[in-house]
């Protein structure tokens, strides 16, 4: 830092140099902070993904155990002569029908018509009409 001996003020070159150094330090600090924040976000995302995947696997295993229990219940209690194959077939048909219903409903929600931004398209058309009117009225009033 250079100080003018006459009145104790700093020169413009010194001020600009300090500004450049301070700006560079600030940018380096911001980049370091961004790296730390992104690293923390990636770590949290990884942990969250592992926990969700573990929960999904356990839920799947629980669902399979439930279906096996239903097969055993139907085959042992409701069908004559312990026909577990028939109980498994009944559970398969019912689970397949439920799965098909869910898949059909899901595909309905994923159709192009459902995903199209209708309101945005409408407002864009309105904006285009407004711009055309402004251009036309501006051309006639000049």
Image: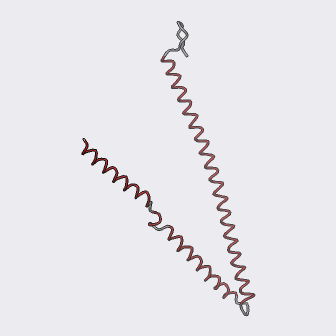
At horizontal 62% and vertical 82% (from top left) the residue drawn is 94
Q: Nearer the viewer, residue 97 or 117?
A: 117
Left or right for 62, reference 107:
right
Position of 27 with respect to 140 (left or right) is right
* Coloring scheme used: secondary structure
Q: Quadrant of residue 30?
A: top right
Residue furthest to the top in view is 6
Q: Residue furthest right?
A: 77
Reply above or below: 72 against 134: below
Of 98 and 33, the residue lying toward us: 98
- Residue at 59%, 45% in the rendered image: 38
| Residue 60 location (% of width, % of height) | 66, 70
Q: Position of residue 42 (x, y in %)?
A: 61, 49
Which corner quadrant of the image does residue 138 belong to? top left
Q: Position of residue 140 (x, y in %)?
A: 24, 45
**Above/below status of 15 relative to 91:** above
Q: Residue at 66%, 66% (x, y): give it.
A: 57
Image quadrant holding the C terminus, namely top left
The answer to whether residue 140 is above or below residue 115 is above
Q: Residue furthest front?
A: 141
Q: Residue at x 44, y 59 (%)?
A: 119
Determine whether, in the image, residue 64 is placed left or right of residue 104.
right
Name which quarter of the figure residue 66 lies in.
bottom right
Residue 106, horizontal then vertical, whole percent: 53, 70
The N terminus: image quadrant: top right
**How many numbered marks appear?**
0
């Amino acid at each position: 830092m250079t100080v003018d001996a006459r009145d104790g003020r700093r020169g413009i070159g010194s001020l600009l140099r300090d500004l450049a150094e301070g700006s560079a330090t600030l940018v380096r600090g911001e980049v370091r902070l961004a790296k730390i924040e992104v690293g923390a976000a990636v770590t949290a995302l990884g942990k969250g993904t592992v926990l969700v995947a573990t929960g999904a696997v356990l839920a799947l295993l629980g669902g399979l155990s439930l279906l096996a229990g239903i097969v055993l219940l139907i085959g042992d209690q409701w069908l004559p002569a312990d026909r577990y194959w028939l109980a498994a077939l009944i559970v398969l048909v019912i689970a397949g029908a439920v799965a098909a219903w869910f898949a059909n409903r899901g595909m309905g929600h994923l159709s192009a018509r459902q995903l199209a931004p209708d309101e945005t398209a409408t407002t864009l058309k309105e904006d285009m009409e407004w711009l055309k009117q402004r251009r036309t009225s501006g051309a006639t009033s000049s």
